[in-house]
Image (cartoon, rainbow, N blue to C red):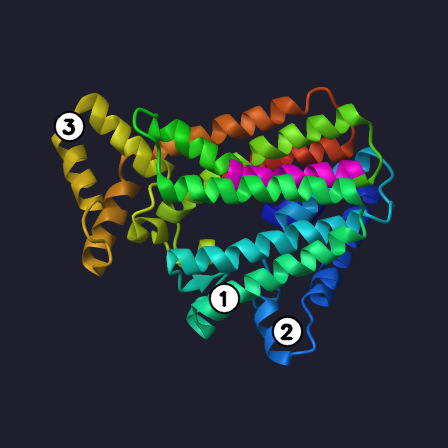
């Protein structure tokens, strides 16, 4: 048994292990090559988060999904590079929007070079991803374009907030499906598609990826409250400070509307105050860590992870399927 990929995923089959390890190594080389520029400063900025590491969750899914077809097909590694470049680009933009100071345990690009450079570096990564896509054919371009539209739509929906009369939790789950689920789904889709897997298999893996992506982000919501910087690689409570309601906060507000308990109302009022003040921010973070809303958010994570696992049922039994199932467990474990 060898541990590979994010969360200590264990691969029990030697052939699968070798394929995944070789594929992930090729992706790392591809990422470094794709982020090179004739301008040294651009190379430095573009490789800032590449070299900081990361789970490489999306490329891993590409490699595992490719096991259901020709796992040596030439488009697999480039498509994995595309999804990771796209993900990295969104991180540069997210950190500007969130005014984040830390990402993957290092200074965020906006902290180091300013907002303009961070945004433009994200755009540079999008451009490089598009260049690689052009060689993968029109179907790959279409799939990526649709996912990118959903990703941006999810971000806009988050910024705009729910419409009057819309349940905030339903709205938020739509946001997550767009912002995170869409690209995780494409990771699975690309792996299956590039390997020439049957259309039904491509569809199953795409559904799995979308549900797993939402579970993954819900786990991040829990981690943002429950973990410290060493565990998450970023500053805890960043979304709290920016007034962005994640699932623990939404579950708290739902509880206030349902029960109207004084202590819950007081915590909500604290969350609605100016949390740029460090003392108030620390108090709010501590309050949420002890509140039942955090446990409810964990249960939401489990529910989506179980939905992802259920989506895999039609696939044949094999080591790759077992690894995909284990990823569901690993996402739940992240949320505690």
Viewer-proximal residue among 237 and 115: 115
Residue 183 belongs to the span the image colors magenta: yes
Q: Disc 3 vs disc 2: which is toward the camera?
A: 2
Relative height, residue 283 to residue 107 (above, below): above
Label annotation for residue 261: 3
> Distance from label 1 to label 3 (Cα)?
43 Å
Q: How packed is label 3: few (under 14 Cα within 10 Å), some, or many (20 or more)? A: few
Relative height, residue 222 to residue 207 (above, below): below
Query: Which residue is label 1 attached to?
Result: 118
Q: How packed is label 2: few (under 14 Cα within 10 Å), some, or many (20 or more)? A: some
Visible residue check, residue 324:
yes
Magenta stretch in the rendered image: 178-193
Q: Are marks 3 and 2 in contact (CB under 8 Å)?
A: no
Q: Quarter of the image containing the N terminus?
A: top right
Q: Secondary structure at mark 2?
A: helix
Question: Mark 1 or 2 closer to N-term?
Answer: 2
> Distance from label 1 to label 2 (Cα)?
13 Å
Q: Quadrant of residue 249?
A: top left
Q: Quadrant of residue 191?
A: top right
Q: Mainly helix, strand or loop, the magenta region?
A: helix
Residue 298 position, x and y percent, is 42, 33
Q: How many marks?
A: 3
Relative to 241, 34 lies left or right: right
Q: Are marks 1 and 3 in contact (CB under 8 Å)?
A: no
Question: Mark 1 or 3 closer to N-term?
Answer: 1
Query: Which residue is label 2 attached to?
Result: 43
């Amino acid at each position: 048994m060898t541990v590979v990929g994010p969360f200590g995923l264990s691969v029990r089959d030697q052939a699968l292990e070798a394929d995944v390890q070789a594929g992930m190594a090729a992706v790392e080389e591809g990422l470094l090559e794709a982020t090179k520029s004739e301008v040294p400063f651009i190379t430095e900025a573009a490789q800032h988060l590449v070299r900081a590491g990361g789970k490489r969750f999306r490329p891993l899914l590409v490699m595992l999904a490719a096991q259901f077809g020709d796992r040596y097909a030439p488009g697999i590694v480039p498509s994995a590079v595309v999804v990771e470049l796209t993900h990295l680009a969104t991180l540069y933009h997210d950190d500007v929007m969130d005014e984040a100071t830390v990402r993957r345990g290092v200074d965020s690009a906006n902290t180091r070079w300013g907002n303009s450079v961070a945004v433009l570096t994200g755009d540079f990564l999008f451009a490089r991803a598009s260049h690689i896509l052009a060689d993968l054919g029109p179907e790959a371009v279409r799939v990526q374009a649709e996912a990118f539209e959903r990703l941006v739509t999810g971000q806009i929906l988050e910024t705009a907030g729910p419409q009057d009369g819309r349940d905030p939790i339903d709205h938020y789950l739509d946001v997550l499906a767009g912002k995170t689920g869409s690209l995780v789904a494409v990771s699975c889709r690309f792996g299956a598609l590039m390997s020439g897997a049957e259309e039904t298999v491509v569809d199953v893996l795409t559904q799995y990826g979308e549900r797993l992506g939402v579970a993954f982000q819900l786990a991040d919501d829990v981690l943002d409250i429950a973990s410290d910087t060493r565990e998450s690689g970023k500053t805890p409570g960043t979304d709290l400070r920016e007034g962005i309601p994640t699932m623990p906060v939404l579950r708290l507000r739902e509880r206030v509307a349902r029960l109207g308990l004084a202590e819950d109302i007081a915590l909500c009022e604290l969350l609605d105050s100016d949390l740029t003040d460090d003392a108030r921010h620390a108090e709010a973070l501590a309050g949420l860590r002890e509140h039942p809303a955090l446990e409810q958010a964990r249960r939401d994570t489990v529910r989506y992870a179980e939905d992802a696992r259920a989506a895999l049922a039609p696939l044949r039994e094999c080591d790759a399927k077992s690894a995909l199932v284990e990823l569901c467990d690993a996402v739940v474990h992240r949320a505690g």
